[in-house]
Amino acid sequence: MKRGLFFMCFVLSFFIVGLAQAAEPIKLGAFFDLTGAGSAIGTPTKLVAEMVVKKINDEGGINGRPLQLVIADDEGDPTKAAIIAKKFIESDKVVAIIGPTRTDTGMASKPIIEQMKVPTFMCVGGDPVIMGGKFGPFHWTFKSPQRTSVAVQKTYAYLKKKGIQKIAIITAADGFGKDGKFWLEKMAPDFGLKIMIDESFQPTDSDMTTQLIKIKAVKPDAIICWTIGKAGSIVAKNAKQLAIDTPLFQCHGLPDPIYIKLAGEASEGNTMPSTKLMVANQLPGSDPQKKVILEFIRLYQDVFHYDRQFPINTHSGYAWDAIYIVANALKKAGTDHEKLRDAIENTKGYVGVSGIYNITPEDHNGLGTDSMVMVQIVNGQWKLVE
């Protein structure tokens, strides 16, 4: 009798331990610029990450295990980003990492990620994090926003269609701006475009009049600005103050109601590549992304009410896509770092907010020009123009 009772207790305890282990949270590190220059992007990205994780957990988690975010603020500082990435891996024992927000912080943390071999899905705009060569390996590094090269292609194809041949470029002197300048210069000949002049500015500059006076003098057919945040609106306002009537094109980082608010009347007529999120209701019903995007908007606005403080912008879906791709890979491969990395790299046909992802060993983004649309600001609203 005692022996039987002992055996039952043993089996029961083993079962309880098994249940506890099965329900153990799967940790994801998540770091964004929450208080630095990119906080207008980083903070809502963090909120979306929390929204996605709640949705996944409410639907049963990852094979019965909940996801748990370990959140950190890198303040837009590359040094702090590198320290956080190391802490995630060594102390927090995360299975994968989501973020950071900016190209510079992504590049600072990438060597640690690659050395310590933890799958990381970044939310940065610049291509260097997944370019290889002089930028270092990207075996463990992925990113959810469209590649800069894809955004440049989309913009240049539109310019060519409009018969534009002579352009001026003005770019930020940070990692994102330099990446934009590289691709703008590299791809211009492919579209029959001649760059008449190129100017640059610091992302923290409060006036770009000097650069724009030089640009006005060469009489380009179009001006392309490559930056994110407040700087883009300053370029637009300075151009208007100088009575420059040349069409202004911004990059894929600026489709955001904040841009219209900051630039005011100077934003009218500005054109830029964007995710489809900004013009969801203008998409045809046949677009496979439309249903996903509308559900995202419903949760963001009607359930979580994030739009009260952070109106939806082109960046809003990046954390959603990054976490869902990682979650889908976790369901298939489990938490082993190598197997998880391989499963992420084999993502095919994932329909996300920002596009339909087809990731390959050569392309750790997986989005093409069909994931983007060209939008224009008309009467203070976003209009789908192509």
Image (cartoon, helix red, strand yellow):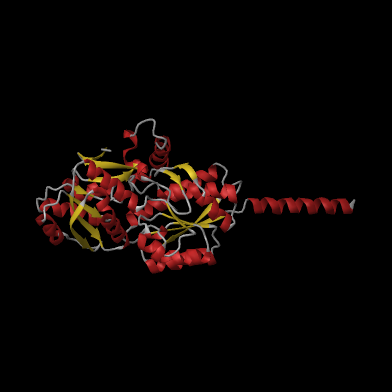
Residue located farthest toward the right when viewing the structure as drawn? 1
Residue located farthest toward the top when viewing the structure as drawn? 285
Does the image show residue 81?
Answer: no
Look at the picture and state if 58 lies above or below 114.
above
Please state which of residues 132 and 29 is positioned toward the viewer in this rendering.
132
Residue 340 lies in what quarter of the image?
Answer: bottom right
Please state which of residues 95 and 302 is positioned toward the viewer in this rendering.
95
Count of marks overlaid on the render: 0
Does the image show residue 120?
Answer: yes
User: Which residue is found at the position 31% from the left and 34% from the top?
Assistant: 282
User: Which residue is found at the position 37% from the left and 57% from the top?
Assistant: 127
User: Looking at the picture, how far across and down is residue 265, in whole percent?
Assistant: 16, 46
Horizontal placement of 363 versus 2: left or right?
Answer: left
User: Which residue is found at the position 85% from the left and 51% from the top?
Assistant: 5
User: Looking at the picture, how far across and down is residue 149, in whole percent?
Assistant: 33, 52
Residue 338 lies in what quarter of the image?
Answer: bottom right
User: Looking at the picture, how far across and down is residue 266, in whole percent?
Assistant: 16, 48
Q: Quadrant of the C terminus?
A: top left
Residue 288 lies in what quarter of the image?
Answer: top left
User: Looking at the picture, how far across and down is residue 321, in whole percent?
Assistant: 44, 47
Look at the picture and state if 264 lies above or below 124.
above
Horizontal placement of 49 versus 331: left or right?
Answer: left
User: Which residue is found at the position 51% from the left and 51% from the top?
Assistant: 344
Please state which of residues 164 and 180 is positioned toward the viewer in this rendering.
164
